[in-house]
Image (spheres, rainbow, N blue to C red):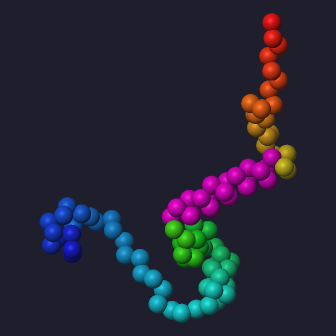
Amino acid sequence: LAFQAQGDPRANAVQAETIWSDPESRTESEHVDSLVKKMAIGVPLQQLWEDAGYSQTQIARFRQMALEEAFTRAVAAGQLAAPPAVESPMSVPDAPVA
């Protein structure tokens, strides 16, 4: 409505979503317990992170970390080959002097 009053083209946006904060006052323990129960009934992890109040940037980082952990577990279980080791420039021996 404010964009429309200003003549801003964003007034015509149809993919906006209002995200309301939770008006209920709960302890952190009650909130986490609620999330665990939602997980038990199959609510996707992404939604649980949003419900927990994490930002989209934090959630993207969590997803990347989860992928890295899954890869590490798969390598440790022998399901995937570990990537070749990359030598550090500090470990390369000096070239012989002619």
Q: Residue at x 76, y 37 (%)?
A: 83
Q: Position of residue 17 (x, y in %)?
A: 37, 71
Which residue is drawn at the image coordinates 52% and 61% (left, top)?
A: 57
Which residue is at a point 65% across and 82% down the rendered structure image? Answer: 32
Tell me if residue 84 can be seen.
Answer: no
Residue farthest toward the top in the current orientation of the protein: 98
What secondary structure is the magenta-colored segment mainly? helix
Q: Residue furthest front?
A: 97
Q: Position of residue 82 (x, y in %)?
A: 79, 40
Seen in the image, is 69 located left or right of residue 22? right
User: In which quadrant of the rendered image does the N terminus lie?
Assistant: bottom left
Magenta region includes residue 94 = no
Q: Looking at the figure, which quarter contains the C terminus? A: top right
| Vertical comparison of 13 with 35: above or below | above
- Count every numbered label the image shows and give the total: 0
Residue at the farthest right position: 77
Q: Which quadrant would residue 30 be assigned to in this image?
A: bottom right
User: Magenta residues?
Assistant: 56-75
* Identity of the residue drawn at 42% across and 81% down: 20
Query: Would residue 79 appear left or right of 59 to someone viewing this image?
Result: right
* Image quadrant in which you'd find residue 92: top right
Looking at this view, is 62 or 98 the one in front?
A: 98
Question: Can residue 42 be seen in the rendering of this structure?
Answer: yes
Q: Position of residue 22 (x, y in %)?
A: 48, 86
